Image (cartoon, helix red, strand yellow):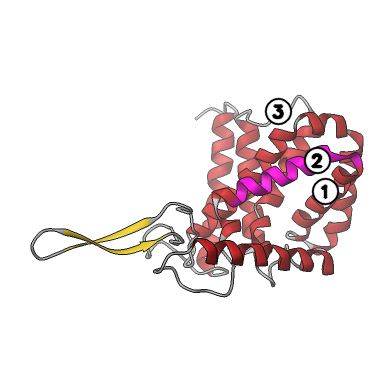
Amino acid sequence: MMARSHITVGACAVAVAASANLIPLKSPGVAIAIMGLILVGTVAPDIDHLSSSVTRSWSWLSWCLSHVVRWICRRIYHATRLANDPAKKDPHRTFTHTSPGALCGGATVAVLLQWHPWVAVVTLAMAFGTAARCVRKSYQGYAAIAGGALAWGVWDALASAWWMLGLAFAAGCMLHVYSDCVTKGGAPLSFPRVTLKREVMPDGTTKIRQRRRWHMSGPPEWIRFYTGSAVETWVIRGTIGLSIFSCYVLLGGPL
C-alpha cells in the first residue's frame, strides 16, 4: 500500500481503539504519544525501501538509516532462507514486515523513550514528523515540534509507560504488515515458521513438494490488488466507513 493508505488505516485503528477504551485516556500525554507511535508504526516497516516516504522523510539521516536496515534485513534473509526461497537482492518486505521485526522495532522505541529526556525528545519529534510527512510534507516541521515538546513535558510519564509505547509502535508495524498482505506482493507473515507445500501422488500418498520460510502470505489471488491502484482507494474508503460505524456502535449510539 501507499504511505497515505497505511496512515489512514492507522488512524482508523486509533479511532476504534480509543472508542473501545483500549488507549489510556486518563493520561493525555501518554495517550497522544501512543496514538502518534501507532501512526508512525504503520509506515515504519517501509524503511527497507529506498524510495518510500519514510526513507525520504529526514533527508540523509533517514537515507543512511534505510541502508543500515536494508543491510540487516538482507543478512537475516540470506541466513535463514531455504532452498525454495528466491535468492533476492532487494530486502524489501523481508524482516521489517514480520512479527519479530515489529517486536524488535517496538523494543527499540521503548528503550529510546526511557533512556534520556533528550533522546526521547528526538525520538518523538522524528516519529511525529515522519507520520505527518506521509500525509502532507508541509506538516512535518509542526508535527516534529509538537512531538518534541510532548516528550520534554511528560517524559516521566512516558518513561514509566515504556511498555505501552513499545507495544503501540509494534501494533502499528503489524497493521502495516497485514495491510500489505492484501496487495499482490503479500508479506512474510509465517516467518520464521517453515511453510510446507504438499502434493497428492496418484497412489494416494502425500509428498512434500516445497519448503519455504519466507512465504508471502495473503488472501486468495483474486482478492488482492496492486499498490496505488483504484481498488486500493476503494478499500481505504470502505475501511474508513467501517471504522466510523464501529466507533458509533462502541460509543453506544442507537441502532
Q: What stretch is highlighted in magenta?
A: 101-117
- Front-lying residue, 69 or 229: 69
Q: Is residue 39 left or right of residue 150?
A: left
Label 1 SS: helix
- Front-lying residue, 203 or 184: 203
Q: Name the residue under label 3.
A: 24
Label 2 SS: helix
Q: What residue type is labelled 3?
A: Pro
Q: Name the residue under label 1.
A: 123
Q: Which amino acid does label 1 sit on?
A: Thr
Is residue 7 magenta-colored? Answer: no
Indicate the quadrant where residue 138 lies. Answer: bottom right
Nearer the N terminus, badge 3 or badge 1? 3
Name the residue at the front extreme. Answer: 79
Question: Residue at coordinates 62% horizontally, 56% vertically from top-left?
Answer: 6
Question: Residue at coordinates 47% horizontally, 59% vertically from top-left?
Answer: 182
Indicate the quadrant where residue 28 lies. Answer: top right
Tag 1–tag 2 contact (CB < 8 Å): yes
Percent across and percent down for residue 192 are: 48, 53
Q: Distance between the residues labelled 1 and 2?
A: 7 Å
- Front-lying residue, 203 or 60: 203
Question: Residue at coordinates 61% horizontally, 49% vertically from top-left?
Answer: 102
Nearer the N terminus, badge 1 or badge 2? 2
The number of numbered discs placed on residues in the rendered structure image is 3
